[in-house]
Image (cartoon, helix red, strand yellow):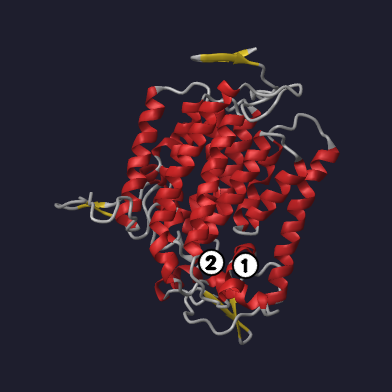
């Protein structure tokens, strides 16, 4: 039996997680309403806050509509084509063999097909709203993951607030542009995969959700080993359950590449109409060790400039350090490195970050480091493993700082409307 500070002892499995969290039943018995009530209330309140901040901020852009690479690709797919018509804007569109293509993986376009079909247009309204809804569900999924892990409701609420409002996920959701929509889709499927992994851990479902995430952003495929964090024996049936859906997603991406560019390994990045100032860096190699010093600086040390008037900070257009947007992620390193869960999580996060560290660009105009969203779900899992059961005031304090910093970025970096019309900060 293992207890938590200030809470009752729970029967834990070999990985330190309870056999049945607040959402589950043990031995067929119904969970006590008193145990569920604070979790349900906290989860609903967090989702309501996310809906207000996410959807409220994206609503004006959703009503305007406009060109979106993913929707343009969805329009082509609905008409039986892989190549798109000539786009209204050629920026970051791939041009190959006389045809135009979106260089993004295919799933975000597939998700937008119903919206595009309903609008009967390749430039529909409502795409930012779709991202806001997905972001809201992702916040609920993170809280459910914390609850399934057996964390006290207020600890789960603090960690979920960190994810929803103390990371660049907030900024990314309310941007609503195609680059950020792809990131939101990735995180959406990733946290759903983690929710299932912390819960019933059905291999086929975890693998399918993870496969969907990599069909939104390919680099997350490098986090695949983390799917086995709860597996303590070589059960080949379960291994196949995890692996086959992921292999199917990889195969689909390779086929998608081949159909567009004649090469299964060609994602289209080499054919995009990129900004001229990025061309010299790209010519040194799309992925190269030469980019490592700049990327490390960008990830760990890039900072805004101070100015003499409110809001006192001039945000760096190339982004701010991950440590300046979400300093609470430092606590992801608090886990016991001898714990298999910890080194699997750290290894998967580092592997997923490696393409970013060797890439020729860091995301361009942004608040924070948007590529860090590829491994943010892994860092959240490490926080659950590490500080989740020994949550202290210093953890809460740094989470509060992270929320403040990312709120600043959302309000002044993305122009988020967080107050009713007529009220000002």
Q: Is residue 361 visible?
A: yes
- The answer to whether residue 40 is left or right of residue 309 is right
> What is the x, y in percent for residue 153?
50, 27
Residue that sits furthest to the bottom in the current view: 98
Distance Cα–Cα, label 1 vs label 2: 38 Å
Q: Which mark is residue 114?
A: 1
For label 1, count other residues whose C-alpha is less than 10 Å away and answer few (under 14), some (14-19) or many (20+).
some
> What is the x, y in percent for residue 192?
62, 45
Q: Secondary structure at mark 2?
A: loop
> What is the x, y in percent for residue 393?
38, 23
Which mark is nearer the camera, 1 or 2?
1
Pointer 2 residue: 285
Vertical placement of residue 108 versus 385, above or below: below
Tell me if label 1 and label 2 are in contact, CB under 8 Å: no
| N-term-proximal mark, 1 vs 2 | 1
Q: Secondary structure at mark 1?
A: helix
> What is the x, y in percent for residue 308?
14, 52
Q: Nearer the viewer, residue 118 or 2?
A: 118
Who's the residue at 51% across and 57% down the image? 131
């Amino acid at each position: 039996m293992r207890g938590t500070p200030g809470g009752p002892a729970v029967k834990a499995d070999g990985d330190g997680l309870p056999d049945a969290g607040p959402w589950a039943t043990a031995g067929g018995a119904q969970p006590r309403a008193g145990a569920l009530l604070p979790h349900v209330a906290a989860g609903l309140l967090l989702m309501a806050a996310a809906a207000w901040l996410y959807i409220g901020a994206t609503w004006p852009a959703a009503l305007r509509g406009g060109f979106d690479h993913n929707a343009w690709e969805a329009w082509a797919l609905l008409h039986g084509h892989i190549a798109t018509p000539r786009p209204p804007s050629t920026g970051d569109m791939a041009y190959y063999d006389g045809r135009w293509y979106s260089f993004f993986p295919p799933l975000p376009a597939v998700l937008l097909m119903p919206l595009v079909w309903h609008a009967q247009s390749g430039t529909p309204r409502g795409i930012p709203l779709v991202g806001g809804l997905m972001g809201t569900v992702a916040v609920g999924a993170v809280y459910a993951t914390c609850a399934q892990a057996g964390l006290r409701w207020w600890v789960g609420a603090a960690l979920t607030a960190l994810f929803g409002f103390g990371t660049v996920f907030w900024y990314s959701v309310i941007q609503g542009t195609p680059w950020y929509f792809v990131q939101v889709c990735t995180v959406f499927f990733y946290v759903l995969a983690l929710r299932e992994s912390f819960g019933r851990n059905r291999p086929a479902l975890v693998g399918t959700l993870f496969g969907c995430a990599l069909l939104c952003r390919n680099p997350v495929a490098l986090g695949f080993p983390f799917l086995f964090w709860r597996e303590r024996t070589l059960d080949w049936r379960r291994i196949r359950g995890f692996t086959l859906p992921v292999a199917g997603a990889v195969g689909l991406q390779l086929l998608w590449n081949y159909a567009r560019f004649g090469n299964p390994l060609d994602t289209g990045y080499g054919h995009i109409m990129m900004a001229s100032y990025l061309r010299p860096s790209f010519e040194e190699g799309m992925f190269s060790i030469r980019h490592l010093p700049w990327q490390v600086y960008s990830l760990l040390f890039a900072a805004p400039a101070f100015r003499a008037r409110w809001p006192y900070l001039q945000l760096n257009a190339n982004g701010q350090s991950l440590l300046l947007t979400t300093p609470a992620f430092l606590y992801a390193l608090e886990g016991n490195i001898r714990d298999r869960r910890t080194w699997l999580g750290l290894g998967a996060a580092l592997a997923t970050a490696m393409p970013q560290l060797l890439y020729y660009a860091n995301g361009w105009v942004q608040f924070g480091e948007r590529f860090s969203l590829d491994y943010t779900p892994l860092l959240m899992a490490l926080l659950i493993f590490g500080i989740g059961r020994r949550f202290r005031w210093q953890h809460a304090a740094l989470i509060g700082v992270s929320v403040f910093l990312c709120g600043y970025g959302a309000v002044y970096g993305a122009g988020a409307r967080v107050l009713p019309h007529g009220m000002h900060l």
